[in-house]
Image (spheres, grey):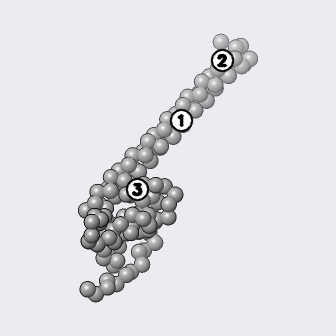
Amino acid sequence: MAKKKRESIPNDIAARSLFISDRTCCVCRMSGKPVQIHHVDEDPSNNLIKNLAILCFDCHRDTQIRGGFDRKLDADQVLLYRDDWHQIVTQRRANYYDKGSLIHQEHSFEIEVATSVAEWTSPIMRTVS
């Protein structure tokens, strides 16, 4: 079998792939581990984002297992893990931003209340009312 030609993954595609996976292996999901970008279809020239998955070195090695009693981490499994992980990361980010905006709203309310109290207790407002 002829070796497939490896092309560098364009920086913007690599960055997007790493970002949507939170730079975390989609199989073991252990953050902080060094990761690699895996070509799901095993064609190193196919750099479409839908063909890429982020795997740690250990899980990436499991995609290379052939035969024997070990069951290889095949393309179908990698896609399931990847898609599930992308949903989790997306949901985490949505929750984070929702909480962030909620905190912002709470602080806005506190500022509004503080401003109202200050207005009511200021000497100028007492003479006007």
Q: In the rendered image of this protein, does residue 103 appear above or below residue 38?
A: above
**Residue labelled with disc 2:** 120
- Name the front one of labels 1 and 3: 3
Task: Name the amino acid, label 3.
Answer: Cys
Viewer-proximal residue among 81 and 64: 64
Residue at disc 1, secondary structure: helix
Residue at disc 2, secondary structure: helix
Q: In the rendered image of this protein, does residue 123 appear above or below residue 73?
A: above
- Name the front one of labels 3 and 2: 3
First along the sequence among labels 1 and 3: 3
Mark drawn on residue 103: 1
First along the sequence among labels 2 and 1: 1
**Residue labelled with disc 3:** 28
Q: CA distance from mark 2 to mark 1?
A: 26 Å
Which of the 4 quarters of the picture holds residue 44?
Answer: bottom left
Q: Residue furthest bottom?
A: 2
Mark 1 nearby-residue class (10 Å; few <14, some 14–19, many ≥20): few
Mark 3 nearby-residue class (10 Å; few <14, some 14–19, many ≥20): some
Task: Name the amino acid, label 1.
Answer: Ile
Task: Name the amino acid, label 2.
Answer: Trp
Would residue 71 be found to the left or right of residue 29 on screen?
Answer: left
Q: At 34% across and 58% down in the image, what residue appears?
A: 82
Q: At 32% across and 70% down in the image, what residue appears?
A: 65
Would residue 107 be found to the left or right of residue 66 on screen?
Answer: right
- Name the front one of labels 2 and 1: 1
Location of residue 75 in the rendering, given as x and y in whole percent from the top left corner: 27, 66
- Quadrant occupied by the C terminus: top right
Location of residue 72 in the rendering, given as x and y in whole percent from the top left corner: 29, 66
